[in-house]
Image: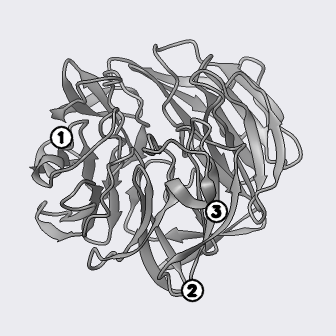
Amino acid sequence: MRSILILAGIVLPIFLQAQISQWRGINRDGFFNEEGLLSQWPEEGPALVLTVENLGKGWSSPVVANNMIYITGMKDTSDVLSAIDQSGNLVWQTPYGSSWSKSFPDTRSTPTIENNKVFVTSGSGQVVCIDANTGAIVWEKNAFLDNGGEYGNWGIAENLLIVDDKIVFTCAGAQTTMIALDKNTGDDIWKSESVNDEQAYVSPILITYNGIHQIIGLGSKILFGVEPSTGKIVWSYDYCHVNNFKWDDDGVINCTSPVFYDGGLYVTSGYNHTSAKFQLKDDLSSVDFQWENETLDNHHGGVVLIDGYLYGSNWLNNSKGNWCSLNWETGEVKFEEEFDTKGSIISTPGQIYIYTEKKGMVALVKPNSDQFEIISSFQITEGEGAHWAHPFIQDGKLYIRHGNTLLVYNIKA
């Protein structure tokens, strides 16, 4: 079932599945349908209404559901899920699997919540269902090892996708590329064929076009579409080697989920890799290349699409990046401007929110394709480590995670 949301002249598909809360909003596109928010912040920033510490190290986002805040973190060598009430009290905390043990081990998987169940994956590929009220583990499965999964240098960073009665997870490797588990029991429903690629930190998205549903995934090199009911790989495209793209031969890293609108798919990666837009066939049987762009090579902060323009930050090196705008139809660069460095980006109707990874600057930005127009900004000074978590907005509150600390701001007008 699909409903249509109008945002600044763009028709965005929103999939109505029962009370799902997840990473980057209901449609995983960074859009939060919140009205009545502040159009400008005080000089010191919006009011800080809650600070929560001792979450464990992590770069995952907080998610709000059931009037609770759910957030993951690493404690010792385990990933843990915490449930916190709106007063900041820890209700329960559950270890759910081994953390990634090599470079950058901090927890990175954001919980996906439907009704009274929380679904999350550990850095080692344990897929777990946890009772949202009690913290009890309902079922767990070592989905990555059981299916011969393959990952790159930074382990597993996927946020699980719910599609109907299924939990979708990208194992990658020679045995299979993507699997679906029964969300109630953890039993296998389907396993796709392999496209012979490794996992690349991308969270898949669910799209609908011409009444057809499809799961879109991206590995280290291969962009692909999957039939949700059967797991059939409908099409695959070697994104890494199209049109002599500027790219490492091995693909290296993809962190940004594809952006979908009106049959178009935009794919971007950091490290000076070329980004590209593709157009799906009317029956979703394949894609055609449309344009490429070397300016907006987003690292891992995501991009947003508003009124026919893409907004996000690019990669100049591991500690630098500018903020950019591209025309959705042509790939034309509208602006590239400096503000601290690269970072994450989300949006609400008529507003953009960015969170830079170097100084932890949080800025309210006006959607303006011709210039980078900052309305207000303030700096995050609590917490530690890189500012890599994507912000979350719900019920007039802005949630910012910095390492072991969660900060909640009142942004309601």
Label 3 belongs to which residue? 277
Q: Secondary structure at mark 3?
A: strand
Say which quadrant the N terminus sits in. bottom left
Q: Position of residue 143 (x, y in %)?
A: 16, 52
Residue occupied by mark 1: 135
The chosen color scheme is one colour
Residue at image location 67% in from the left, 42% down from the top: 312
Any part of residue 92 in sight: no
The picture places residue 218, in percent across and down from the top left corner, at 43, 56
**Alpha carbon of mark 2 to alpha carbon of mark 3: how far?**
16 Å
Q: Earlier in the sequence, mark 2 or mark 1?
A: 1
* Residue type at tag 1: Gly
Q: Nearer the viewer, mark 2 or mark 1?
A: 2
Q: Nearer the viewer, residue 199 or 41?
A: 199
Given contact means CB atoms under 8 Å apart, are the residues at marks 2 and 3 in contact? no
The mark that comes first in sequence, 3 or 1, is 1
Type of amino acid at the residue the image marks with label 3:
Lys
Task: Read off the residue under disc 2.
Answer: 282
Residue kind at label 2, given as amino acid type = Asp
Other-residue count near label 3 (Cα within 10 Å), few / some / many at <14 / 14–19 / ≥20: many
CA separation in Å, label 3 and label 1: 41 Å
